Structure formats: C-alpha cells, structure tokens
Image (cartoon, rainbow, N blue to C red):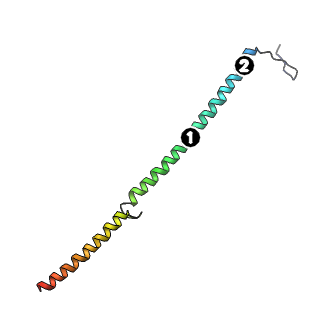
Amino acid sequence: MPARLNESSEITIPLRNLIALVLATGVAVMGYFNITERLNFLEHNSDLLTISVEANSEFRTLWPRGELGALPDDAEQNLRLTYLEELIRELRSELDRLTD
C-alpha cells in the first residue's frame, strides 16, 4: 500500500544526518559565493586590462605622429632646429649674394 503524505505526516531523521545536511548546504553556499566573487574580480581585471591595452595602442599610434603633443625637450629641440634652418638659409643667401 503506497504511503500517503499530508500535513500531519512525520519524518524522522537522525540528528547526525541533519547536521551533515546543514553543514553541506553551508559549504555549498559559501563555495557558490566565493566562485561568484572570484569571477567578478577576474572580469573586472579583464575590463581594466582591456582599457589599458586600448589606451596603450592609441598612444602607440598617435604619439609618433605628434597627435598627442610633444615632450618639452622635443619642443625646445624643434625651436632650435627651426632657428638653425633659418640661419642656414640666411647664410646661403649671403653666400649667393657674395659669389654673384
């Protein structure tokens, strides 16, 4: 004859098994939250690395073209080169004037 369950049915379980079930549930819940937290941490790190790589790639392509500015030393060097180019032009024109 099949057992009939209703609201007044009783179940007996040894206390040792009940404690083991509660502990196993606690360990499973802790493991789930630890894994979830670790995945969130790794995803966040991955996002930060992606941003860093994209910024580095942009810097790598734009810096040599001068689209991101220049170092102060570069600016000073460019001023000196411009001055020297003008001086050479003046000296050449003076030399051409003297040799003619």
Question: Residue 81 at x, y = what percent?
Answer: 28, 70
Question: Residue 84 at x, y = what percent?
Answer: 25, 73
Is 84 placed above or below 96 here?
above
The residue depicted at 77 percent of the width and 15 percent of the height is 13
Question: Residue 6 at x, y = what percent?
Answer: 86, 22
Residues 69 and 22: in front is: 69
Question: Residue 78 at x, y = what percent?
Answer: 31, 68
Q: Quadrant of residue 4?
A: top right
The residue depicted at 46 percent of the width and 53 percent of the height is 54
The residue depicted at 13 percent of the width and 85 percent of the height is 98
Number of numbered discs present? 2
Q: Which residue is mark 2?
A: 19
The type of residue carrying mark 2 is Ile
Q: Which residue is mark 1?
A: 41
Crowding near pointer 2: few (<14 within 10 Å), some, many (20+)? Answer: few
User: Who comes first in sequence, dot 2 or dot 1?
Assistant: 2
Residues 87 and 7: in front is: 87
The residue depicted at 55 percent of the width and 44 percent of the height is 44
Q: Quadrant of the C terminus?
A: bottom left
Q: Is label 2 in a helix, a strand or a loop?
A: helix
Q: Quadrant of the N terminus?
A: top right
Circles 2, 1 touching at the beta carbon (< 8 Å):
no
Is 23 placed above or below 51 here?
above
Is 72 placed above or below 98 here?
above
